[in-house]
Image (cartoon, helix red, strand yellow):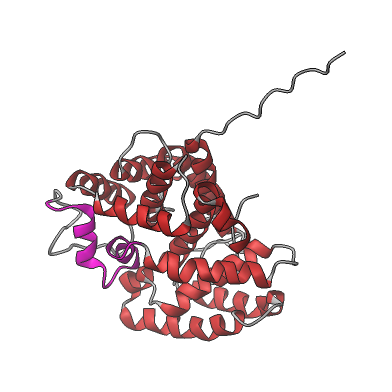
Amino acid sequence: MSGARKKPPKKIRPGDAVRAAFERACLLELEALKPGNVHVFADGHGMTVSDFRASAEAASAAIARDGLSVGERIAAAVSASVAAVKCNTNLGIVLLAAPLVHAALEASGKATSEAKYRAAVAGVLKGLTIEDAEHAFAAIREAKPAGLGKAIRHDVNSRATATLVTAMRAVAKRDRIAYQYANSFADVFETGLPALRDGLRRFDKMDKAQAWATTGVFLAFLGRYPDSHILRKHGEKAAEQVRSEASEIAQGFAHTDEPERMAWVLTAFDTELKSRGINPGTSADLTVATLLAASLLDIVAPRTAGRKGGLAP
């Protein structure tokens, strides 16, 4: 008597895998101790971990929806988030995630590598249009980010007159999210992913290895670049002061195999920044983008991502 025929495993749609990768990146970032930002160890700035979890779930379906342009992904995800939590929790995350997601969906089903995926991201950016800028401007207006102000060129309160990349290039010197659009996500691929992989290697045998590695990514960004969110709200001097303070902590963290011993330093810095009303939001956004890129590489280039720092469950 022959055994029952096994059903073939259910094939996961690319959009579903990308949606899960986006939500996973958002949730993992919340598990990391990130000084000045919202995380599971402490809320802050009038926002809670629950707000970020709700907005991640709301945005995930929109940003990975089939058939959308990059601009449409941004607008749909921001609208879903604002409707869910009634405030701006993830505008920066969505702006960074949309091109990464779009490139992964385009690469789905093709043999690829990290280098080819990075080239695909650059290709997506090159193909952005004025319509993409219109959608992104509308999303920014809906989110109402703090300290936005008005721009002389490419003001989001006016109709777009150039492509989204052109608009981003105009502010790339003072906005690290715009810098990614102007430079093919160089910070994510050259700072974020190496820091993530280094942390995963050093903390491989530990509980919460991914969370500690994520803290390392956040510190790598915060200690290297003046945070754009701090710069907009508090000015260049405050942004540079925080960068300098974070740099010392980041150097120590990058050379430890026992991150728990630095928890008190990180917690004290977290408390101090929040008492000053300082939120390194752009560094947190870049951290999510790094986690997302790692997870998307697990999907589109698993052979090159796997043992080098992939985040597959």
Q: Image quarter for residue 181?
A: bottom left
- Magenta span has 168? yes
Q: How many marks?
A: 0
Residue 96 vs 281, above or below: the answer is above
Which of the 4 quarters of the picture holds residue 215? bottom right
Residue at image position (30%, 47%) is 139
Residue sitting at the far right:
1
Which quadrant is the N terminus positioned in?
top right
Pick out the residue farthest to the front: 1
- Does residue 122 lie above or below 147 as drawn? above
User: Which region is colored magenta?
Assistant: 161-184
Residue 118 image point, x, y percent: 40, 58
Residue 71: in sight, yes or no?
A: yes
Q: Nearer the viewer, residue 207 or 42?
A: 207
Q: Kindly give the residue lying farthest to the top in the view shown.
A: 1
Horizontal and vertical percent position of residue 41: 63, 63
- Nearer to us in this view, 291 or 298: 298
Q: Residue 288, how many percent across, how many down?
A: 49, 58
Determine if residue 33 is in view.
no
Q: Is 256 left or right of 123, judged from the image as shown?
A: right
Measuring 27% from the left and 49% from the top, which residue is drawn there? 136
For the stretch drawn in magenta, the main secondary structure is helix
What residue appears at the point 43 percent right and 65 percent down from the top-left corner? 188
Q: Residue at x 61, y 67 (%)?
A: 213
User: Within the magenta stretch, is there residue 155?
Assistant: no
